[in-house]
Image (spheres, coloured by chain):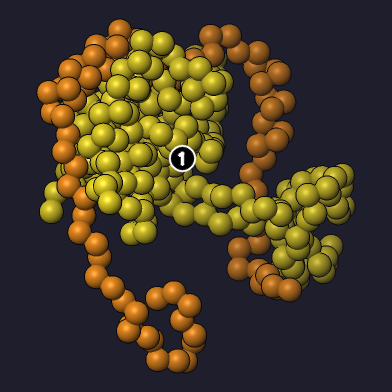
């Protein structure tokens, strides 16, 4: 059964585009561009921070150091230990332990420090993680997401090879990732996947609304409202 | 399986078939018009994908930021004890 929400043409057609790959930087990192789909290790902060704390410290033989997992209170401030040379940690820095997963993401921003700093390009990208819907997510809920009912979610239609399953971008999980650790979503080994220009513009509009409470284009707001109503009218639950 | 207990037989007696999926009826003509307007609006926004470029770099000051980006040095293979 074809899921009507997976019709890419619902919001715009195409939603994704396949384009030639962008190659690699002089340092060997994949060159990526805003709007591109990549795979990256992404983490979720824990409600209370977990850290790896040093327990036994042998200044003569670092391999004999022992470590324990500790939890910090939300109000913990200031140094928690002496500087740890072997871990390259200052007294007020920790190694945090978080859940994480390698998952698809949309690149939101890259940073090019320019001609004078090309030998040391900025090592981070800003990405928006993509999450696949769970089986428990009913069609009506998915329709509400597609209709842009939720300010923190942006619907992603399933359209292999760019994106295999219906999902969402969750704006509250936007995070930096290491540029050296991302892999472009590839097709046939040479081409890469991007949001189309229209999907990219609507995403930017919605992200602006999420971040600053105002979209980029007032006229687009009106069209999105009409789109919202059109989708939800089609998904009205049966009466009675 | 929700609420399963390790070592006990799984209970499938409460499974129910999935409900019939809703068949949405889109107003295709209306949707086509909205889609065309969204496309027109989006294109008029003329957003770029060039990324952020820093036209001026203060190399000396920039280097100071790198102090916060020191590589993590970990003793790979060191045991970690869970409390």
Q: Residue at x 36, y 50 (%)?
A: A132
Find residue A149 and report its horizontal and vertical position in percent.
Answer: 41, 34
Chain A drawn in what color? yellow
Q: How many marks?
A: 1
Find residue A209 and report its horizontal and vertical position in percent.
Answer: 49, 22
Answer left or right for B75 relative to A209: right
Q: Given the image, what chain letter belongs to the residue carrying mark 1?
A: A
Camera sees residue B60: yes
Looking at the image, is A240 positioned above or below residue A11? below
- Residue A205 versus residue A108: which sits nearer the camera? A205
Label 1: which secondary element: strand
Instruction: Indicate the quadrant where residue A14 lies.
Output: top left
Q: Residue at x 25, y 65 (%)?
A: B18
- Residue A177 versus residue A84: which sits nearer the camera? A177
Quarter containing the C terminus of chain B? bottom right
Answer left or right for A72 relative to B7: right
Chain B drawn in what color? orange
Find residue A34 and report its horizontal and vertical position in percent.
Answer: 39, 26
Quarter containing the N terminus of chain B? bottom left
Camera sees residue A127: no
Instruction: Indicate the quadrant where residue B68 lies.
Output: top right
Where does label 1 land, which residue?
A: A170
């Amino acid at each position: 059964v074809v899921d009507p929400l997976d019709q890419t043409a619902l919001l715009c057609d195409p939603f994704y585009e396949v384009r030639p790959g962008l190659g690699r930087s002089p340092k060997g990192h994949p060159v990526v561009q805003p709007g591109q789909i990549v795979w990256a290790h992404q983490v979720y902060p824990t409600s209370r921070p977990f850290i790896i704390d040093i327990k036994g410290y042998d200044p003569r033989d670092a391999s004999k150091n022992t470590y324990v997992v500790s939890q910090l209170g939300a109000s913990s401030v200031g140094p928690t230990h002496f500087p740890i040379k072997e871990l390259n940690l200052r007294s007020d820095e920790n190694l945090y332990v978080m859940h994480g997963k390698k998952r698809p993401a949309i690149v939101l921003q890259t940073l090019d420090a320019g001609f004078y700093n090309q030998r040391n390009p900025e090592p981070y990208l800003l990405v928006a993680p993509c999450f696949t819907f769970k089986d428990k997510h009913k069609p009506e809920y998915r329709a509400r997401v597609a209709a842009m009912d939720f300010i923190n979610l942006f619907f992603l239609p399933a359209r292999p090879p760019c994106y295999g399953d219906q999902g969402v971008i969750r704006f509250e999980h936007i995070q930096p990732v290491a540029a050296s650790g991302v892999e472009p979503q590839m097709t046939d080994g040479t081409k890469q996947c991007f949001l189309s220009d229209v999907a990219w513009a609507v995403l930017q509009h919605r992200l602006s609304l999420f971040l600053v409470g105002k979209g980029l284009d007032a006229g687009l707001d009106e069209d999105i409202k009409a789109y919202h109503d059109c989708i939800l009218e089609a998904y009205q639950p049966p009466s009675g | 399986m929700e609420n399963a207990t390790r070592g006990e037989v799984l209970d499938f007696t409460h499974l129910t078939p999935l409900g019939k999926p809703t068949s949405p009826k889109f107003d295709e003509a209306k949707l086509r018009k909205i889609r065309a307007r969204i496309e027109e609006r989006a294109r008029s926004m003329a957003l770029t994908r060039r990324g952020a470029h820093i036209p001026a770099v203060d190399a000396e000051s920039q280097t100071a930021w790198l102090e916060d980006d020191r590589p993590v040095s970990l003793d790979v293979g060191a045991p970690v004890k869970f409390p």
